[in-house]
Image (cartoon, coloured by chain):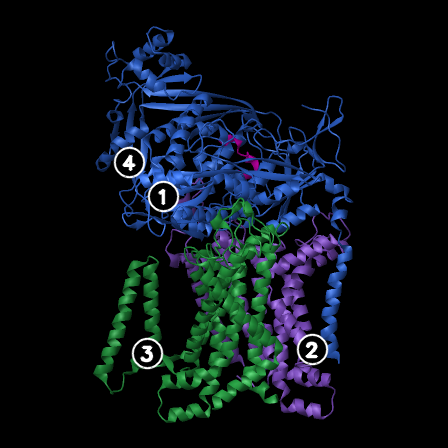
Chain colours: A blue, B green, C purple
Amino acid sequence: MTIRRVLILAPTVLILFLVQSYFWVPTYEQQTRGNPDRLNEYIAASIGDASILNPILSADSASSDINSMVFEGLIDRDEELRFRGRLATSWDIYEEAFFYVNEDANIPGKGRAGVEEVATLLKRAKAGDFEAAPEVKASLDNIREISVVPARDFLVTRREKENEDTETAEIKIRVSAPARIKLVLNNVDQDLFQNLSRVLGKDYFSSFNGQHYITLDDETWQSKRAVYAEEILPATEHNPTVVFYLRPGVKFHDGHLFDASDVKFTFEAIMNPKNLSPRISDYEPVKRVEVVDSLTVRIIYKRLYSPALGTWAMGMLPEHLLNDEALRKEAIHLGKDPEKFSMRQSSFSRHPIGCGPFVFREWKSDQYIVLDHFDKYWEGSPNYNRYIYRIVPDLLTQEMEFYAGTIDSYSVQPHQVKRLRDNPEYQNFSGLSFGYTYIGYNMRREPFNDSRVRRALSMAIDVDKIIDYVLYSQGERITGPFVKQTDYYDKSIKPAPYDPQAALRLLEEAGWRRNKEGWLEKDGKRFQFTLITNSGNDLRKAVLAIAQDAWKQIGIDVRTDLLEWSVFIQERVDKADFDALILGWVMGIEPDLYQIWHSSQTHPYQLNFVGFKNSEADDLIIKIRQEYDHERQVVYSHRLHEIIAREQPYTFLYVAKWTAVLDRRIVIKETDRQGNAVYKKIKPTKTGNFTFYFNKWVKLPETPTFSQEG
Amino acid sequence: MRRRSRLQESWRLLKENRLAVIGLTIFILFFCIAFLGLVLTTGTDPTFDPARVRLQEKLQPPLSKPNLETLRPEEVPKLGVYLFGTDDLGRDVFARMLQGAWVSLTVGFVAVGISVLIGIFMGGIAGYFGQSNVRVDQVLATVVLLLGGGLLVFGARTPGVVLLVLGHVYILFSVWSKRIWGKRPIPKWMGVLYKDAISADTLIMRFVDIMLCFPSFFLILTVVALLPASMYNIMIVIGLTSWMGTTRFVRAEFLSLREQDFVTAARALGVNHWRIIFRHMIPNAMAPVLVSATIGIATAILTEAGLSFLGFGVPPPHATWGGILSDGKRFIFDAPWLTFAPGFAILIVVLSFNLFGEGLRDILNPKLRERN
Amino acid sequence: MLSFVGRSIIQKIITLFFVSIVSFLIIHLAPGEPSQVDPLNPKFTPEMVERFRKEFHLDKPLYLQYVYFYRDLFTGKTVSWKDNQSVLRKIWERFLNSLPLFIVGTIITWTLSFPIGIRAAIFRGGFYDRSTTFFSYLLISIPGFFFAYILIIFVVTRFHVPVIGMETFGLGDASWLRLIMDRVWHLLLPSVLGATGGIAILSRYVRSQMLEVEGQDYVRTARAKGLPEEQVYYKHALRNALLPFVTMFGLILPGLIGGSVIIESIFSWPGMGRMAYEAILARDYPIILTVNFVSAVLVLAGTFVSDLLYLVVDPRIRL
């Protein structure tokens, strides 16, 4: 029977063909040990693929991983989290401050004064003519230069809409600005004007009225006068300034020299609304970027904003490949409309060129991204020839590939740490991450508006046990919103102890008593609420189950719900429609808490969704983000930390530790003065970053003996 | 008399098919366990508390004894032993499996119930009233109303309101015109509107076609991912996306039954439509529905497990077998029982449903019966 | 004939139109925003979110969004929100990746099922029949991912060869034969896994179809002629039992695009299902909608093809 034979033979042959291919496939041993090239490759694994390889446009972690290899910023953070020069060798921070001369104000012991008089007065004050309080003196001493900006007239136009339907009107504003005094300060000083007002009179700055100096032609817009005056003629102005001195001779991967215009270009690209850069808010306080010469850039800020310096760790773009002309050419080449074509559409995002240690080579969507080392890298070419970023979406398969040796590093799940630690083939590192997990309470709702209730809820959960058993000790407690490794975090603050009895006493104080069935009750209403979190995060899911169980034991009826991430965010968090939720924040090193904790940020779609309001905290948050002096920032932060820990708007749970496992044969290779290779064991830096010296890593055929070191 | 003998006949046939008997046994056993599970795991102080967290006792292998020193008396499992071990939070896997049995069963039954009801309804209409036509004006009025409502919802106020008003005005008009004109011939221009546009059968079958155009697992996934996760949503979504098969063969069955003598006779006697449908046709069309429902339950349980794997299954505090399985897969090297216990449980139950369904098919198939 | 083709094409286009509306509504009415608009990232100011929405036309009324989307789709200009790549190109890329899996799976399913099913029909009620019934239901009843993990762990620990992905990683510049064989090896597990369910279902179906035609006169005649049992089945019964399979064969086309999310995630296979799944999570509407649309087109094309095949195969049908 032919049909029958065909039907049986065809699949059999096919399957045999498939199975015989087994003999062609290298086993893991052959791949990892028999192949010398493998030693020169470093393979990292990721769950998700990158989306856009342009540092100013990317927002996901996979893209950032690659961008940090291909691109390089002006500065970064060193082992101690201090700033360190990369493309910039050094930098200066100073401030230019301005104020308009208020001719109507009475200066104590002087009366009304013109611009020259005020300038002289200040110079004399600086010279020590006045008996002044020490802080005023400090401010005065900080002034490097006092000069006069003469009065001038100019014209400003603004566009306004009366309401949604009317056309935009163009408003001409004639300004005859009075003279200004310009002060150049050695260091940024947020208290400058407060201290100067001790010299010039309490109301000198606040009584300045810009409205006298502007005229509006159009009568209909007179109501906006005060707003315009405030905008165009602010009484005082802080202009912190950063000057970067760039490293000479740095080249992009295509051989083009990096210079100051690239920095300016990168800034402008971020601010260009066409590009829709997600980083725009970081750079919004920048007033302008000036190219002083090819290796010097000056960045002038509109206002005090201390997290500013850190933003320059952003990768620098090559101007010659992405400027308007280049984009126009590409658009025409692709047959697209040049007017609408932006950096987002450019093929650059899939073939990036930067000046980082690795050169982009190949990207296969959802499979891998390959980078080659850059042999002209200014700090010396990395030891690995190749960096490969594999996309393996399933954690379990990642683990199997790691054991097999086709992935070099692998972010270990807490429960595997112990097993891997005991394995002599691997070395492992762990450190605290920058994020923490918390339970947040909606303080707009009963009964969470009572801090005793919040504290009681915190005390009912045995966080240490969660850390011990759920995280397998791969975590630490946290009591406040700062990154635990930094000194902004006040280590002396103690977490709320685990004590269900004390929690019950606190709840009783707040009016909650147990009823016959054992549930807590107040005014006949049962203590009942819903705790929610997003799906897809096993740790949060575990905390959800534990918290529910723990609260049930003190008589609280807790419902739980898991929601898909974007539904969770959009429907519940953004609209503040929740009782309590489990979430985490990944913190930047900068202690800027404005968006998460300031009372102005409690509206829908803002990040203070728990509705935390505390005037002292508000004050401190503003002070911290305007303060450029580290020591003072620390003092403010500790106070803020204390307030938040006392109020317990969140139950701060833990900071997880990350653990990475590497083959023991991967070591740091350095050359000593005689040119001999010296091998060192990889050690995490103080802040727990083990890839800090990645460029010096090398994989050896055998584990070497290490040179002695401290 | 005849009915009973038919039942006896079926029973005899079933007994011959050993696989189907095994399937049925497990099926019934599973039912009992699920019901027992419901009783034993709910209430304020259940016998087996699936939500009891004992962190110090996590990942204990099956049959291990609880450590009495570290546990408070109320935390000790009632059996004195962790029959299936404990999971990563120290919860008793046996208790969770018990609870999961009920949840999985509910998911399967409710989802299939929904799909069968819709299927019978749609298939019945298509098969029985299929030849009656929908008129052009009816189609137009419905389209206008739907479009108007749609536009209103999506922000285009004015055109939406206009269309809605138009639709209602037309309906009033047609009711009114029927009364005025009575038996007089309708004018020519209106004749177009009164033409038959499409048969009910075509309408329903086209709708089935539309539904079949969505890849089913994908459709479920999209909807479940987008809706807030809850047990009910999952059941409803699975039900709403799997009724097309039932519709198709209920329709086919009805089409052939309509022509059978007993139906024609009933109609000739002036029995009304609904009585014919419920008394005479549905009982005769039930066999294939029953078979596909049995297999449908198995599929629904598997679908739920697949959704759990992707993180969209039934959310806690309800435990489902799929959920336990996908939670446990992280620990497959450290605690294999977390994967294998629910994995095999699903396998066995789904298998028993399938085998029973297959047996049922053989028994109810008259052609095959003749041969025996 | 021609009128049938014309009518059925018009019908299919109308269906497609409704499908496009329904899928559009499901996605746009559901809560959630594209992941580019990440409101929990402190760097996103409300103005940014607004600007993104504008870029994606999300601020427009729905019917306009619908028009924009399908206009872009038909002019081939749709781009993914995630990375600004052309959606059609992305789908084509993934389609090529899914294709070998699909082809191998289909061939195995559509050949092996017949002898298995027929043999079961011949020895109906016997040991062979029972064991195939049992095994095919066993294969249908295993949760796919459970089975996949067990298989992977078995192969990796037992044979120490890579099975994940489309090719062995870092094979570099081995000979072309080796590269091809390597790819073939990686095809084995996922395609066999995909085929098992298919074989189980189809062979059951073959069996019942065979039993269905078995009582027919021509089969009895053939048997009465004294033909060997196998010949009766393969030559006389099979040809007539084939009709329903023609319809089924048309319906496997959409399998091309559906793929299996679960198998592809576990095997890190960059296929269609996984792309669509990730698009759902990231609310990448253009990709979700295009995949949906393309698969609807395939389903309709499939039914169309099977209708035509029916015409050709079954002389009784004249439309």
Direction from residue A688 to residue B184 in the image, left or right: left
Q: Secondary structure at mark 4?
A: strand
State the residue position of label 4: A171
- The mark lying in front, picked from 2 and 1, is 2
Marks 2/4: CA–CA distance:
93 Å
Residue under the image location 65 percent in, 68 percent down: C106
* Magenta region: A311-322
The amino acid type, in three-letter code, at marker 1 is: Asn
The disc at residue C127 is: 2
- Residue A318 screen position, x and y as percent: 56, 35
The disc at residue B193 is: 3
- Residue A423 screen position, x and y as percent: 69, 41
Disc 1: host chain: A
State the residue position of label 1: A442
- The mark lying in front, picked from 1 and 4, is 1
- Residue A115 screen position, x and y as percent: 30, 14
The amino acid type, in three-letter code, at marker 3 is: Leu
A497 magenta-colored:
no
Disc 2: host chain: C
- The mark lying in front, picked from 2 and 4, is 2
Q: Residue C20 lies in what quarter of the image?
A: bottom left
- Residue C73 screen position, x and y as percent: 49, 58
Q: Residues within 10 Å of mark 1 (few under 14, many from 20)?
A: many
Q: Secondary structure at mark 3?
A: helix
